[in-house]
Amino acid sequence: MTTKIIMDTDPGIDDAAALTMAINDPKIDLKLVTTVAGNVTVDKTTINALKIVRFFNQSIPVAGGAEQPLFKDFEDAARIHGESGMPGYDFPTDLPTPLKKTAVEALHDEIMASDEPITLVPTGSYTNIALLFSEYPEVKSHIKEIVAMGGSLSMGNMTSAAEFNVFTDPDAAAIMYKSGVPIVMVGLDITMKALLTHKSIETLPTLNEAGKMLHDIIIHDGDNSDAGIAMHDVNTIFYLLHPEAITTKDMWIDVVTDGAAIGETVGDIRGAYHDGKTNAKVSVDIDSEAFNKWFIEEVRAIKD
C-alpha cells in the first residue's frame, strides 16, 4: 500500500535528499511538488525542485509558490546551502516547465481531486500551507495529516529558541498549528540526533549516480560537524516509512509570532494550559543508527 503525498519544499540540500527518497521509494506516491521561499529565493527553490524531478526522469508536476513570508521580512539560508541552494553537482539543463498554476491553486486542485486523503509534507516554511487554509478551508477535511519538518522543544538554529522553517514564517506556522488538521512535528529534537555520518556520506558515491549526486551536494552543506551532517527534511520521509523508529509525544504546540523569541515552538509538556487538548504529535527521539542504515539502503535501491 502506498502513501499519497504532496511535498511543499524549499530545496536546499536536505530537501533535495528528501525529494530523492520520496520519488524513488515504492511505498510513497508523490503527486505534486510545490515550492516556497526559504533556504533560497522561490525562483531558485523551484529550479532546484525541477532539477531533482528531471534527474530521475519523472513527470511529477512542480508549482512555484510564495515569494516571501506573510508578514515577516524574508531571511534565507544561503550561508548553509550556497547561493544556488543546491551546489556541487552538474544537473541536466533541459528542465521541465513548472505549472502555470500557483502553488496554492495546485495544492487545492490536487487535494480535492484525490480519491483518498493526502498527506502534506512541508519541508520549508509553511507560507503556502497557511495561504491554502485561508483561501480554501474546505481542503482541511481532505488531508490525512501534515508531517512537517520544523520546530523544536529544546533548541534553535536561527536563534537559541527558533528553528529555521518556523522562524522564516512564524505567522504561517501559527495558522497551520491552529488548523485542526493532524500534525506530526519533525523538529530539531530528532534531526540533530539522526546526523548522516561521514561514513555514510562517503559510501554514497560508491552506490550509483544518485548516490554520487547526493554526496556531491551534501558535502557542500555548511551545517557540518565532526559527527556528521543533519539531513533535517529527510526525517519526514523516514517517519512516513518507519514510524516505529521515531518516538512521538502528543501535546499542544503554540508558535511565538513576535518579540525576541519569534519563531519558537512552545510545547505544553505538562498538558496544563489547553484543557488537555493536543494539536500535534511531537517527535522527541529517533533511532539514529536505523536512520543511517535506511538512508544508504534507499539510495542503493535506486536504479541508474
Image (cartoon, grey):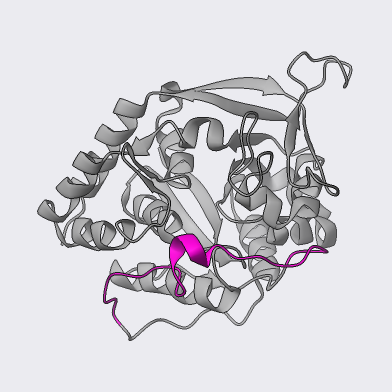
Residue positioned 61% across, 51% down in the render: 164
What is the residue that sits farthest to the bottom in this orientation? Answer: 94
Residue positioned 51% across, 76% down in the render: 44
Location of residue 53 by image quarter? bottom left
Does residue 219 show up? yes
| 93 left or right of 33 in image | left
Nearest the viewer among 1 and 74 is 74
Rendering coords of residue 278 (x, y %): 77, 24
Q: Please check the rendered image and state whether residue 74 is part of the magenta-colored stretch, yes or no.
A: yes
Does residue 11 show up? no
Q: How many marks?
A: 0
Rendering coords of residue 206 (x, y %): 10, 52
Q: Is residue 27 above or below residue 35?
A: above
Q: Is residue 235 above or below residue 18?
A: above
Range of magenta residues: 69-92
Residue positioned 37% across, 37% down in the render: 195
Nearest the viewer among 109 and 93 is 93
Rendering coords of residue 133 (x, y %): 79, 54
Location of residue 88 by image quarter? bottom left
Q: Quadrant of the N terminus?
A: top left
What secondary structure is the stretch in magenta mostly built from?
loop
Location of residue 101 by image quarter? bottom right
Q: Quadrant of the C terminus?
A: bottom left
Q: Is residue 298 above or below residue 210?
A: above
Residue positioned 72% across, 37% down in the render: 265
Q: Please check the rendered image and state whether residue 283 is part of the magenta-colored stretch, yes or no.
A: no
